[in-house]
Image (cartoon, rainbow, N blue to C red):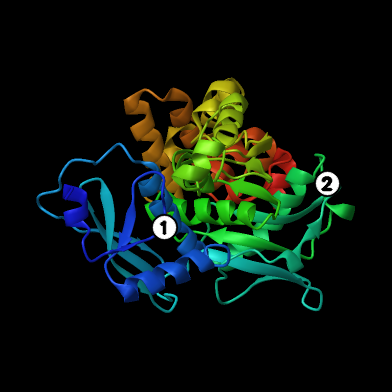
Amino acid sequence: MKRQQIATAGYIHLGFDTGRPLFAKDESVYKLFLRLKRGVCVNYHMTSIWRTLMTLNADAIRGRSLNPAGDVRTIVCGHITMDYLLCEGAVLIQGLNIAKPLTATKSGLYKVDFDNDGDEWRVDDAPINRFSKKRLSLSKRSEAHYAAVSGKFNNITDAGVRMPEHIIGAFKSTRFLIEDNEMLNYSLFWSEKNCHKSEYAAESLASIMQQSTANDLPVNWLIHGEGFYTFKNAAKLIKTAPLASAAQREKNFHAGNAKNQNVFFSNPSDSSSVDSLKALCEEAGLTFVGLNANHRDLRRWSTLKNAGTEIGKSAILAVAGGGAATLAGMVGAGGAGKVAETGINALISGHYYTAAACVAGTIIIGQGIYKKLLPMAASAKCTFGNGNQRWYSGDKALIKG
């Protein structure tokens, strides 16, 4: 008897005849596997676990050696957990646990609707597990849903209010035009503070995109601010771990990738070029639509490189007009003090444009001379305030906002 047959004796084969074989430990695990398979198109947490299984199935070469320690590996996504081990080139699923949805974190996918009575956008209290075709918005090209991956905000309510400005600004100038530049609803992918680069956020977003493809639901995505990092990691996952078995991928190399997903970037925290953003999208089967960068956010290297001269001139004027005494008197004063500290650190490290901008920003904050130095004021608001949360259309609009 072959070693693999000995190792898998008593396990239930899950029916994949190509690629690395998958087995369930017992009947209870097998029943949960079937439930997982049925839930892929309705619950993106299940999609994440299923993608792991498909990746293991398709990877029939790596890990064929004996696993003497019998180490059990655990995959967790939301309220679903899977325990498995690799043995003689087979995947042995030890356990599946599909619990009630977690409420400990607010990160996830939410419905956002416009309240005509209150004349405001409202985010639903509870997250959802998939996009609904009933909530489709009309685009000029075809029916598609609108969704946003938000950057850094104080809370989900603020993000829900701000994202429509970005979505409308992004898609009104493309072939994906929103009819009359209005929306009745959209979906928001929200990540809590410091979670944009997390594995959970990337897994979830990748699953939502792949799930939308499986459901034949086109989506127009707006990627904002720090949400770029979530998207970048999700795109890599989609590329390397398609939602398809080994047999499906043998027939079609692109099986299981995302498609009918159009992507626009607004104020991305990264300084990637248009060409690199196009390549990132195309590798995952997504369609790049456009980029609107905030040219006043000095945290982006491309901004310093392209706008540094203009901002530097404004900084010199501000320093000359304010004087060292004014700056010295503000070093310990709240936010302005932090700006000055940032400027000192930038000066030491050789980032001279940042240093000059910080000094000017400190004086501007203290003296309130925004109108006299509009480029510098806009840069201070975007770099040290919440200006990056707005759709960038010009300095005046940014300062008034």
Residue 32 position within the rendered picture, expressed as x and y whole percent measured from the top left: 40, 72
Left/right placement of residue 146 relative to residue 110 reads: right
Q: Residues within 10 Å of mark 1 (few under 14, many from 20)?
A: few
Vertical arrangement, residue 379 with respect to residue 3, above or below: above
Q: Secondary structure at mark 1?
A: loop
- Pointer 2 or 1: first along the chain: 1
Give, as a three-letter code, the residue at label 1.
Gly
Q: Quadrant of residue 188?
A: bottom right
**Residue 66 horizontal side relative to residue 211, left or right:** left
Residue closest to the eye, 7 or 382: 7
Circles 2 and 1, Cβ within 8 Å, touching? The answer is no
In percent of the image, x 18 and y 41: which residue is there?
65
Q: Which mark is residue 177?
A: 2
Depth order, front residue of 87/16: 16
- The residue most toward the left is 68
Callout 2, which amino acid?
Leu
Neighbours of disc 2 within 10 Å: few (<14), some (14-19), many (20+): some
**Residue 94: mark in rendering:** none
Residue lying at the far front in this picture: please name it: 1
Label 2 to label 1: alpha-carbon separation? 45 Å
Name the mark on residue 15. 1
Q: Is any part of residue 350 visible from this angle?
A: yes
Q: Residue at x 64, y 44 (%)?
A: 259
Position of 304 compared to 80: left or right? right
Q: Between residues 289 and 23, which one lies in front from this camera angle? A: 23
Which residue corresponds to the image point at 37% horizontal and 27% vertical from the top-left?
347
The image position of residue 189, as x and y in percent, is 56, 59
